[in-house]
Image (cartoon, rainbow, N blue to C red):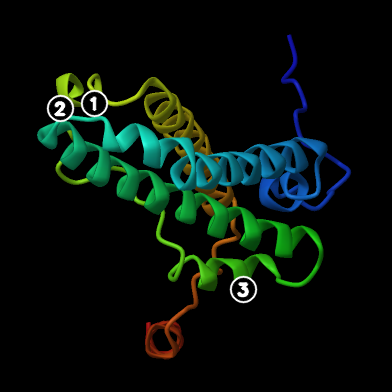
């Protein structure tokens, strides 16, 4: 029984997920979904949400205020990330430039001081739905961002000139 040859003879460059994803129809759908959610939330908070918040008890109104701020912050992070990725898709930014922009667009994985579910349950159903949608979208984007970040090429390790000289001396002098 012989040894199976598993070497790839045709050396193709590695396909980078980030480059292919931002150019895909899937990204365009994600972009539209995210921006639509931003628009729907803004319309709700400026319209019906304002009216609904006035009908809440004091403690629920405080919860409404804090949750609506968390919601808008989360959506701003989402929109910023989507816009950076669209800029990559349209050739306005390279993946490395997008990585630099990432320092300005902070996607936080965990929200500090999350509101107790019992308090969120007292909020208007429309706001609860928007919060749920934004959290699900945020989780998807965090996952995609990790995949894109993990896919970036890592620089080749450089050999220290000191070690290179040391090796040459060792070879020369045994």
> Of residues 149 and 143, which is closer to you in this image?
143
Q: Residue at coordinates 38% horizontally, 90% vertically from top-left?
A: 162
Residue 60 in percent (x, y) is at 17, 32
Q: Is residue 11 left or right of residue 169?
A: right
Q: Nearer the viewer, residue 77 or 157?
A: 77
Give percent across and percent down for residue 53.
Answer: 30, 36
> What residue is pinned by disc 2?
116
Task: Relative to 142, say whether 108 is above or below.
Answer: below
Asked if marks 1 and 3 touch (Cβ < 8 Å), the reply is no
Quadrant in the picture for residue 161? bottom left
**Counting other residues with Cα less than 10 Å from the Cα at mark 1, is it few (<14), some (14-19), or many (20 or more)?**
some
Which sits in the foreground, 33 or 40? 40
Give the mark nearer the N terminus: 2 vs 3: 3
Q: Relative to residue 31, is residue 169 drawn left or right?
A: left
At a point 58% along the width and 39% down the height, the residue shown is 40
Foreground disc of the pair 1, 3: 1
Depth-wise, is mark 2 or mark 1 nearer the camera?
1
Residue at numbered disc 1? 120
Count of numbered labels shown in the rendering: 3
Q: Residue at x 75, y 20 (%)?
A: 4
Between discs 1 and 3, the one toward the N terminus:
3
Residue 107 shown left or right of residue 4 in the figure = left
Quadrant of the rendering where the C terminus is positioned: bottom left
The numbered mark at residue 97 is 3
Mark 2 secondary-structure assignment? loop
Left of 68 or right of it: where is 1? right
State if disc 1 and disc 2 touch (CB < 8 Å): yes
Determine whether 41 is above or below 98 in the image: above
Distance from Cα at disc 2 to Cα at disc 1: 7 Å
Picture coordinates of residue 104, whole percent (x, y) = 44, 70
């Amino acid at each position: 029984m012989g040894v199976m040859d598993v070497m790839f003879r045709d050396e193709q460059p590695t396909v980078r997920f980030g480059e292919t994803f931002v150019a895909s129809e899937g990204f365009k759908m994600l972009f539209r979904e995210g921006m639509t959610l931003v628009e729907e939330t803004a319309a709700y908070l400026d319209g019906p949400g304002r009216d609904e918040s006035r009908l809440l008890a004091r403690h629920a109104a405080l919860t409404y205020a804090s949750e609506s701020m968390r919601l808008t912050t989360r959506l701003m992070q989402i929109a910023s990330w989507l816009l950076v990725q669209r800029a990559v898709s349209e050739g306005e930014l390279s993946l490395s430039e997008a990585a630099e922009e990432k320092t300005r667009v902070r996607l936080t994985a965990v929200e500090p001081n999350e509101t107790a579910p019992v308090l969120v349950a007292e909020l208007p159903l429309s706001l609860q739905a928007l919060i749920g949608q934004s959290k699900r979208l945020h989780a998807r984007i965090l996952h995609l961002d990790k995949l894109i970040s993990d896919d970036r090429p890592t620089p080749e390790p450089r050999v220290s000139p000191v070690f290179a000289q040391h090796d040459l001396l060792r070879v020369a002098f045994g």
